[in-house]
Image (cartoon, helix red, strand yellow):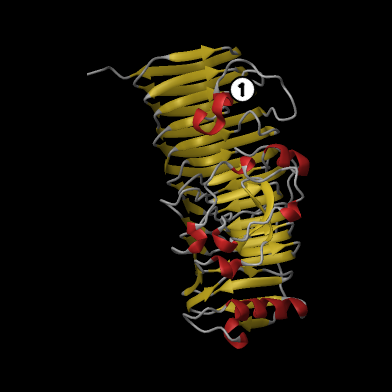
């Protein structure tokens, strides 16, 4: 990874990024009372707070194991983990109180927030070659909300200040993310490794100007252990990252259902480049929270190795918003499942009758739509299926181009409820010759060749 950030080019106007600058003053957490292998939350927070009050600087976490609860970053402070430094985060809810403003699965509420949290700060960073280790077994993981999907639990019409989940008397909480700044400007995360998260790993929410580079994430085996989730944020660059995730690797989100529509903040102007997805449900996923719209996303020069799906789109009938102006180029994929998957209906276990294609529902503000998607110069070394589109009948997927694709797959193509789909200059080696198209229009195959493997 080069030290400087190379210029960003994209199919849409994009901000240019530079490394952040912090005052030269430094303060080791040992100077404020941190002790190795002892709970040192107050000492670590004190170092950050003192630097912030003096105009900024670098809070140093030296080599060794340091135990802590929630840390709140402050403006103009870089939390720097030296090589060999490990921050181990508490397993107990009490070390994350009081509740803070956060967004969990696209809905605003008051709960644990994140292990490394920030709200309304400018010019903040987490850097270094050290390691972050998430909560072990304890009340944080035991008291997680599991009674229903979140939109059926958190009342969307109740003021956010009254949506408080602090875990007192055994009540459930919403799991803390690992690193999640909210309402922040100019966020820089570089070099650190993250493992054993309780929930999503790196999640900028309502942020403007985010650079995430050279991070390593390992959350394999952890349910909902997403790698990097960009949520209702803008002007974001992700590069040179390696993610092995318990859920999706790179994920783009924009709020959920009625609460997401109320907030109405898109995710836009995002570039992901020169990165590796190792393991995970999806290499790059848009959704399933889409209320504020996902637009102007450019993913290029990446490798997805041993992930489930390669390029994945998700939403649901009641999620609202959708996605548009989305571009993928020069990606190599070795997959367990489908190469290009549009999953717009979900399953009956979570969505009930809304997961059924028919009858058609009335189009309203909660009806999402995906459109204007370009995918080109892709190599798929292995997949279970080339293309799978299950869109919403009353809101068909539209204007998708797949060009210069080389695919090895078991199955070919399923398209339900789409229009203006172009598959061009594509070669497929498959075990099955079936192409199924239902309730779709203007699906064009232009110079597509298929070689079906002879059955033994």
* Residue 146 point in image, percent of width and height: 52, 47
Classify residue 51 by image quadrant.
bottom right
* Residue under numbered circle 1: 392
Classify residue 115 by image quadrant.
bottom right
Q: Is residue 342 above or below residue 48?
A: above
Give the quadrant of the N terminus: bottom right
How many labels sit on residues? 1
Q: Residue furthest front?
A: 169
Give the residue drawn at x 58%, y 54%.
174
Q: Residues within 10 Å of mark 1 (few under 14, many from 20)?
A: many
Q: Report whether 89 appears left or right of 106.
A: left
Give the residue drawn at x 60%, y 60%.
179
* Residue 134 point in image, percent of width and height: 49, 63
Residue 292 in view (yes/no): no
Q: Name the foreground residue: 161 vs 199.
A: 161
Residue 211 in view (yes/no): yes
* Residue 37 point in image, percent of width and height: 46, 80
* Residue 435 point in image, percent of width and height: 45, 14
Classify residue 57 by image quadrant.
bottom right
Q: Name the foreground residue: 106 vs 20.
A: 106
Q: Name the foreground residue: 381 vs 316.
A: 316
Q: Report whether 396 appears left or right of 364.
A: left
Give the residue drawn at x 54%, y 15%.
445
Q: Name the foreground residue: 286 vs 158.
A: 158
Give the residue drawn at x 61%, y 54%.
203
Q: Label 1, secondary structure: give it.
A: loop
Give the quadrant of the C terminus: top left
Q: Is residue 10 above or below residue 79?
A: above
Q: Report whether 57 appears left or right of 92.
A: right
């Amino acid at each position: 990874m080069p030290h400087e950030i190379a210029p960003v080019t994209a199919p849409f106007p994009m901000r240019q990024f530079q490394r952040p600058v912090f005052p030269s003053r430094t303060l080791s957490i040992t100077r404020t009372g941190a002790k190795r292998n002892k709970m040192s939350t107050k000492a670590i927070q004190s170092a950050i707070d003192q630097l912030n009050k003096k105009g900024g600087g670098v809070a140093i976490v030296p080599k060794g194991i340091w135990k802590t609860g929630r840390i709140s970053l402050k403006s103009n402070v870089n939390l720097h983990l030296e090589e060999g430094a490990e921050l181990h985060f508490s397993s107990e809810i009490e070390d994350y109180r009081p509740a803070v403003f956060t967004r969990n699965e696209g809905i605003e509420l008051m709960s644990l927030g994140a292990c490394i949290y920030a709200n309304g700060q400018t010019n903040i960073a987490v850097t270094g070659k050290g390691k972050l280790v998430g909560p072990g077994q304890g009340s944080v993981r035991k008291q997680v909300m599991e009674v229903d999907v979140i939109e059926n639990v958190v009342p969307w019409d109740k003021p956010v200040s009254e949506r408080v989940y602090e875990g007192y008397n055994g009540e459930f909480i919403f799991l803390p993310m690992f690193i999640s700044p909210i309402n922040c400007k100019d966020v820089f995360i570089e070099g650190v490794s993250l493992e054993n998260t309780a929930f999503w790993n790196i999640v900028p929410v309502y942020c403007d100007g985010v650079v995430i580079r050279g991070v390593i994430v390992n959350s394999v085996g952890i349910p909902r252990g997403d790698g990097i989730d960009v949520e209702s944020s803008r002007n974001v660059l992700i590069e040179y990252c390696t993610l092995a995730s318990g859920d999706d690797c790179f994920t783009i989100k924009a709020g959920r259902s009625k609460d997401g529509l109320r907030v109405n903040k898109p995710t836009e102007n995002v570039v992901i480049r020169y990165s590796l997805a190792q393991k995970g449900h999806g290499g790059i996923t848009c959704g399933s929270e889409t209320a504020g719209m996902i637009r102007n996303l450019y993913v290029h020069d990446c490798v997805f190795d041993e992930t489930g799906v390669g390029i994945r789109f998700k939403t649901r009938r009641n999620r609202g918003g959708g996605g548009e102006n989305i571009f993928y180029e020069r990606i190599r994929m070795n997959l367990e499942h489908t190469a290009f998957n549009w999953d717009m209906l979900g399953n009956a276990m979570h969505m009930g009758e809304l997961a059924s294609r028919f009858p058609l529902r009335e189009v309203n503000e909660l009806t999402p739509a995906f459109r204007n998607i370009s995918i080109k110069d892709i190599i798929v070394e292995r997949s279970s299926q080339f293309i799978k589109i299950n869109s919403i009948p009353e809101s068909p997927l539209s204007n998708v181009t797949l060009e210069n694709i080389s695919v090895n797959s078991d199955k070919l193509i399923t398209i339900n409820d789409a229009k203006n789909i172009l598959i061009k200059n594509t070669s497929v080696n498959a075990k099955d010759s079936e192409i199924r198209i239902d309730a779709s229009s203007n699906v064009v195959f232009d110079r597509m060749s298929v070689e079906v493997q002879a059955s033994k």
